[in-house]
Image (tube, rainbow, N blue to C red):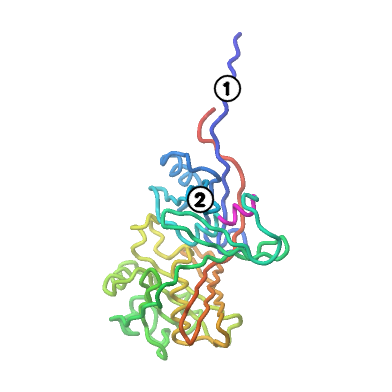
Amino acid sequence: MAYHRKTTAKQVDLKLVDVFTKEPFQGNSLVVVLYGEDLSLEEKTSIIREMNATKGVFIGDSNDGKSDFKINSFSKRGKIDCDYHSLIGSAFVMIAEKQVTLKDGGTNVLTVQTRDGVFPLLVQTKGRELQQLMIMLDWNEKAEFRRIDYDNTMMAEALGLAPEDIRRDVPIQAVKMNRWSVMVPVTSKEALNSVVKNRSKLFNLTTENNVEFICLFYTNESLPDNKIYTRVFHPNANSNGFGNYFEDLITGLSNPGIAAYVFEQKLIPISDSKITFNFSQQSNDGRIGEIIVEMVSVNDTIKEIYIGGNATCVLDGKMKLTQY
């Protein structure tokens, strides 16, 4: 009898990381594949489908001569734009796997190459323990603000709330921080949790006011640590490859805009030039994420802005891509 030696199966090192949380099964999950840049488009999208994930990041070596590593983000349908969620998750994996060198204690800087440019990340550690990752945002102009066409009654109707659930002491405005978002300050956490998700009404709201996100949030001066509770709706999410998840999956895209609005309206006490906002955001499926936004201001003008948080790995293994 003749024996035939089997060839080695093609496989990849794969992680499932919950981003913007330290707690497993919270935050926003992300598939991360180490050094998977040479995989085909079909292999990348198949990995994401197999993991039943909305998004995956494939890490490779940088080729710009200055970045620590390179990432590309994909949905089940193909390549998508990189976002803060992908940056935080991939950097967390590279640090956990000791693929980058950090000095003990203090703050390190990592640079990540994406198709949208190079992003610097501040890595804050205590001893050898990772505390949080903060992305330094490009900040060339002040945040833009404009009034919108919906009053409190119309906004409440679109959200399935009572008019008194929306604050009347501050204006409902649209804010642009990369993307235009409507800011809707509500009067309680109960109001935040009782929103009726009517996709057609929310889609009309964004279309008629030429915005991408609807940001509901609750905060007041008595909450500790500048806490902000928020939910974010993205009615045209299909255009970015996120299927029917029209409530934001905790990507961090809207939080700098909310922070700019809170700063502009002075909704929290501001006693220093550096302000830290601690967000607790609920997602489409009830998961909770913790997002940090830091701002540095001079004479009531924002000069620097950072967004970040933490992550935790909930799955670590290998995935076979071929039979042998």
Label 1 Cα neighbours within 10 Å, binned few <14 / some 14-19 / many ≥20? few
Give the main secondary structure of the magenta stretch: helix
* Eye-nearest disc, 2 or 1: 2
* Amino acid at dot 1: Lys
- Going 55% across and 30% down the picture, which residue do you hit? 9
> Viewer-proximal residue, 246 or 65?
65
Magenta stretch holds residue 99: no
> Viewer-proximal residue, 205 or 261?
261
Image mark for residue 6: 1
Mark 2 or mark 1: whose residue is earlier in sequence = 1
Q: Position of residue 214 (x, y in %)?
A: 38, 72
Q: Position of residue 143 (x, y in %)?
A: 40, 77
Per the rendered image, the range of residues in magenta is 91-97
When the figure is inspected, residue 247 is found, relative to residue 192, above or below; the finding is above
- 143 relative position to 293: left or right: left
Residue designated by label 2: 65
When the figure is inspected, residue 113 is found, relative to residue 35, above or below; the finding is below
